[in-house]
Every structure is written in structure tokens, then in C-alpha cells.
């Protein structure tokens, strides 16, 4: 049975959703606010989350960020907000799809089925989307790094560099390869760029940046990620 977590503070809408979902044999939990949602998501391990963005205690986007710290559960956002920035913020934070209120129940259920199906079909052979170390977790699909209970903010350049290293764990990646991939062929002798950006990544990810455990320098050669 597919378990749905409905996060919505409008009791009438919650009632309508619960009745419709249960009639279609979904198991339903409902949370009226963000804090309850985060607690229930951990306790009940839903297969999909339906999330209203306008909650009484926190912004729905922060609920998405909280969930994405540890789970890839599909998140279908429900919102009265039509502004495209809101949609972009929700999708950037890791939501899978977006339905604007008012919506028809048939459309919502179709989107829900699609969101669940996508995760069931997601190929695991194309690499592990989650890279976990004792110090931090990297979600390659959501492009997020989580450390000590919070998201680590990376610049696009830092992310690009990190992604190349962590997707080849244990392998030496040469300076030239990294420079070409991240900065382009014309910059392939700018090893000082690499030193600067690697130092930044270590400051953000390593417990002791001066003695890195994960982002290892191979002097004169390149870098290696030890997972
Ligand atoms: Ca609301």
C-alpha cells in the first residue's frame, strides 16, 4: 500500500484529500504544520509527500529542505501561490512536482501516481544518488550536501569539482582533468585555482581542513576522494 503524508493546514482540504486518497486505497497521514510534517515523515516513512507551501509555523520550502537532508521521497507541492519564483524555489529545494490550487482531484491523483512511479522506475544502476561518509552526505540528484544537521552551501564551481571527485571514489583525478572539466581547456595550467577551491571545499566539509580525511591531495598529481 502506498503511504501518503499530507501536509496542509486547511482542515477542509485535508478532509477532502484523506477521503479521496483512502477511497483509492492509499494509507494517509496528515500533518497540519511543518514541524509535525518533519516528525511524521521520519516516523511513518511515507512513499510520497503532498506539501502545502503556506504553513502556519514555517515556509513549506524549509520543509522541503529539511526532508531533502535525509530522504529522496517524492514531494508534490500544493500551493495557492502562482508566482513562478515560488515554484522555482520549491523545485530548487528538491520538490518533484507542483500543483497550483485550486486543482481538480483527478489531476492531483494523476500527478501523485506519476511522482510515485518515477521513484519506482529510477534506475539505481546509473550510480548511487547518495554518497554517505561519517562526516557528510551528498545527494547527487538533488545536488545537496548535508553535514551536522544542516545543508552546506556550495558555489556551482565547488559543486562541479566535488561531483567529479566523489563520483570516482578512491581514484586519483589529475589536476589537468579537473581544470579542463571545471574551468575549460584553456585554463588547464591554473593549478592555483584548484588549490583555492579545494581549500574552500575542505573548510566546508572536513572536520579538520588542515588534515583532510575525504578530500585528499596527491602532491603534484591531483586529488582523490576517499569515501
Ligand atoms: Ca496553507
Image (cartoon, helix red, strand yellow):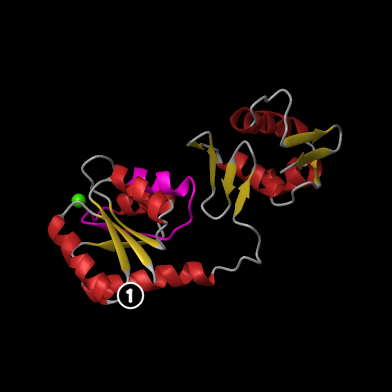
Residue range in magenta is: 61-83
The residue closer to the viewer here, 188 or 113, is 113
Considering every residue shown, the one lying at the far left of the view is: 12
Is 1 left or right of 174, judged from the image as shown? Answer: left
> Residue 102 occupies which quadrant of the picture?
bottom left
State whether label 1 is within 8 Å of ligand 1.
no
Is 172 left or right of 77, judged from the image as shown? Answer: right
The residue closer to the viewer here, 10 or 191, is 10
Q: Is residue 184 visible?
A: no
The residue depicted at 66 percent of the width and 33 percent of the height is 197
Please identify the quadrant where the N terminus is shown: bottom left
The residue depicted at 48 percent of the width and 52 percent of the height is 71
Label 1 CA crowd tier, 10 Å (few <14, some 14–19, many 20+): few
The residue closer to the viewer here, 86 or 94, is 94
Q: Which residue is mark 1?
A: 110
Please identify the quadrant where the C terminus is shown: top right
Whether residue 80 appears in magenta in the rendering, the answer is yes
| Total marks in image | 1
The residue depicted at 48 percent of the width and 56 percent of the height is 72
Give residue 162's position: percent from left, percent from top: 65, 43
Give residue 145's position: percent from left, percent from top: 55, 42
Q: Is residue 77 above or below residue 104?
A: above
Whether residue 139 appears in magenta in the rendering, the answer is no
Amino acid at each position: 500500500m502506498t503511504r501518503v503524508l499530507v501536509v496542509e493546514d486547511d482542515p477542509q482540504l485535508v478532509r477532502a484529500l484523506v477521503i479521496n486518497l483512502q477511497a483509492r486505497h492509499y494509507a494517509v497521514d496528515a500533518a497540519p504544520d511543518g514541524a509535525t510534517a518533519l516528525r511524521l515523515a521520519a516516523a511513518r516513512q511515507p512513499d510520497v509527500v503532498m506539501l502545502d507551501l503556506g504553513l502556519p509555523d514555517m515556509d513549506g520550502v524549509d520543509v522541503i529542505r529539511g526532508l531533502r537532508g535525509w530522504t529522496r521521497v517524492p514531494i508534490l507541492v500544493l500551493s495557492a501561490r502562482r508566482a513562478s519564483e515560488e515554484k522555482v524555489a520549491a523545485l530548487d529545494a528538491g520538490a518533484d512536482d507542483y500543483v497550483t490550487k485550486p486543482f481538480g482531484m483527478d489531476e492531483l491523483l494523476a500527478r501523485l501516481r506519476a511522482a510515485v512511479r518515477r521513484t519506482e522506475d529510477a534506475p539505481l544502476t546509473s550510480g548511487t544518488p547518495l554518497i554517505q561518509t561519517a562526516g557528510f552526505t551528498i545527494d547527487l540528484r538533488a545536488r545537496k550536501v548535508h553535514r551536522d544537521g544542516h545543508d552546506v552551501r556550495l558555489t556551482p564551481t565547488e559543486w562541479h569539482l566535488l561531483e567529479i571527485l566523489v563520483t570516482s571514489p578512491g581514484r586519483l583525478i589529475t589536476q589537468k582533468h579537473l581544470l579542463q572539466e571545471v574551468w575549460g581547456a584553456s585554463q588547464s595550467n591554473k593549478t592555483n585555482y584548484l588549490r583555492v577551491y579545494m581549500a574552500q571545499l575542505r573548510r566546508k566539509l572536513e572536520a579538520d581542513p588542515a588534515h583532510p580525511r575525504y578530500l585528499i591531495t596527491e602532491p603534484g598529481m591531483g586529488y582523490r576522494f576517499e569515501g
